[in-house]
Image (cartoon, grey):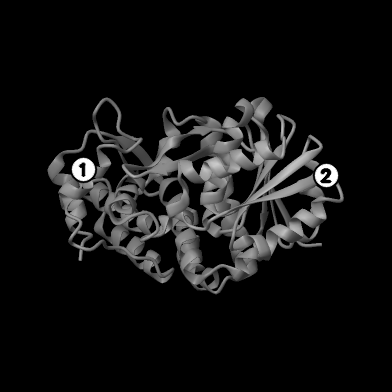
Amino acid sequence: MSEHNQVTVNLGERSYDIHIRSSLLDDVSLIAGAIHGPKAVIVTNDTLEPMYARSLCKKLSEYKEVSIIKLPDGESYKTLDTLNLIFTQLLEERHDRSTTLIALGGGVVGDMTGFAAACYQRGVNFIQVPTTLLSQVDSSVGGKTGVNHPLGKNMIGAFKQPVGVFIDTSVLATLPDREFSAGMAEVVKYGLIWDHGFFEWLEANSSALSSRDAEALSYAIRRSCEIKAEVVASDETEKGQRAILNLGHTFGHAIETHFGYGHYLHGEAVAIGMKMAITLSLNLGSLDEKYLYRLDALLKSFGLPTNVPAEMTPECFFEHMSVDKKVSHGQIRFVVLVGKGEAEVTSNVNYEAVCSAIMACTE
């Protein structure tokens, strides 16, 4: 039996567990136990359908009546039009409120499945089975769901908590290198905003992680989930502290929107955005320059970009950031570090300091 780590997201009556183990998809009894009604629908994409969905469907069919909804693969399909494909099939198959949706895929599939679950017949249960590192450590936990709009990323969505998250670490063996690197950006984020000791552990274990050492990866995933669970439990709908999870995302979402969804993977854009956020923190006098060099080196060790092409000017950033979800009362809010492992959200930042941070990370 492989090691089984479990993390609980404490949200009162809506609390749920995150199960982390290798080969979890070989024994689906845990997932089956989270399906409360007689029917389940696996929502996946056309890349993962032959790799994992067919097998999962066959195994779960021993417990429940199960079907598959196959979506096109890619961030560019994270739209209302694609979301409607889910609703159409659910209606055609006569699913009711007792049906459970199962998100089998990365962040795009997870976000769209969760949003569909929040909307279909005003709410059905859903389960997260994340298959990318980024979705395992970030998007599958916490209940943020939604789709993109040409004017802004994740601008249409809902808070909808899953009834369980089931992480099979062995699926990471088939993850493309670029996708794996993108996931490490979110792992690094947790060390920056919450646990400097974890940041130092990542520095010391970057080679093991890059080579996908099972023990190192299992710890990195568990610790990331623990931190996210703690933050989400303290502020589920992002009225305060939870916003620190957006470190680098204000800049990162602007990059994704500007270049078109999918040009930069989400984690790649966030990596650049985090360097900008730490540079901004440096400009505000919160950190020393050595910390910025350490972050840059760590991100590069995972094969992540740390600069954006100079064609994306500060004016471009401000144009996109002005329609970001984190804008409040007309002011752009930024997550900055006030110390190692300590973050806060502020709108008390002058235009010149932000421009300086952006320009320092262009090439």
User: Badge 2 local density, few (<14 within 10 Å), some, or many (20+)?
Assistant: some
Tell me which corner region of the image, top left, top right, bottom left or bottom right, holds residue 312.
bottom left
First-in-chain label (1 vs 2)? 2
Who's the residue at 78% across and 61% down the image? 26
Who's the residue at 80% across and 51% down the image? 60
Who's the residue at 26% across and 61% down the image? 308
- Residue 290 rendering spot, x and y as whole percentages: 28, 61
Q: Is residue 142 left or right of residue 253?
A: right
Query: Residue tagged by mark 1?
Result: 319
Q: Is residue 38 left or right of residue 194?
A: right
- Residue 215: image tag: none
Residue type indicated by callout 1: Glu
Where is the N terminus found, in terms of image quarters? bottom right
Who's the residue at 21% across and 61% down the image? 362
Secondary structure at badge 2 equals: loop
Residue type indicated by callout 2: Lys
Q: Considering depth in this image, is 30 or 300 the residue closer to the camera?
A: 30
Q: Is residue 287 left or right of residue 302?
A: left
- Residue 15 rendering spot, x and y as whole percentages: 66, 32
Quick check: 262 above or below 38?
Answer: below
- Residue 122 rendering spot, x and y as whole percentages: 61, 26
